[in-house]
Image: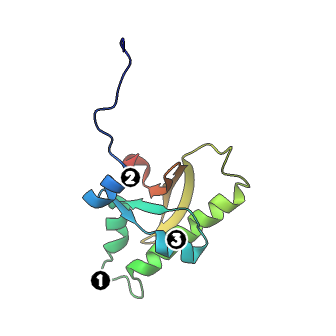
């Protein structure tokens, strides 16, 4: 055995979804053309949900669609995900302000987040 490290516990993507740290949006992502299992961080999810009263015509589903669509376009423009460097910047407009999100593709799928969520 020696000094080899071993895993005592592994916090999986499924654990993070169960705990509410990540929000599964795979169904909506597929509607947008993203075929990978897709999650948002809770932070981003809360921002998309918090729609001020002055924001006429906005809802969570529309905001989510905008984020997923811009992510889809960014990933599609990359040609191949196999050799890509992650995270990649995704620009979206939320509340009239351009925001930079990060998209990360790994063995579990796609995660979309604010850079500070990394």
Point out the residue furthest to the top here. Answer: 2
Real-space Cα distance between discs 1 and 3?
26 Å
First in residue order: circle 1 vs circle 3? 3
Q: How is the image coloured?
A: rainbow
Mark 1 or 2 closer to N-term?
Answer: 2
Q: Residue at x 38, y 18 (%)?
A: 4
* Residue, disc 2: 13
| Res. 118 image quadrant | top left
Dot 2: what SS?
A: helix
Residue visible at 63% across and 60% down?
74
Is the residue under label 2 in contact with that under label 1 (CB below 8 Å)?
no
Q: Position of residue 76 (x, y in %)?
A: 68, 62
Q: Give the Cα distance between marks 3 and 2.
A: 17 Å
Q: Give the foreground label among 1 and 3.
A: 3
Give neighbour class at mark 2: few <14, some 14-19, many 20+ (Cα, 10 Å). some
Percent from the top left, x then y, of residue 14? 35, 56
Q: Which residue is mark 1?
A: 53
Quarter where residue 53 is shown: bottom left
Residue picked out by circle 3: 29
């Amino acid at each position: 055995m020696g000094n080899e490290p071993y895993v005592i516990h592994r916090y999986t993507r499924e654990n993070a979804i169960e705990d509410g740290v990540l929000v599964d949006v795979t169904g909506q992502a597929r509607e947008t053309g993203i075929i990978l299992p897709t999650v948002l961080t809770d932070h981003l999810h809360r921002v998309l949900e918090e729609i001020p009263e002055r924001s006429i015509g906005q809802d969570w589903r529309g905001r989510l669609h905008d984020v997923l669509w811009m992510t889809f376009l960014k990933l599609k423009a990359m040609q191949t995900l196999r050799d890509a460097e992650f995270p990649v910047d995704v620009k979206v407009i939320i509340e009239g302000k351009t925001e930079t999100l990060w998209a990360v593709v790994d063995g579990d799928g796609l995660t979309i987040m604010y850079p500070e969520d990394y």
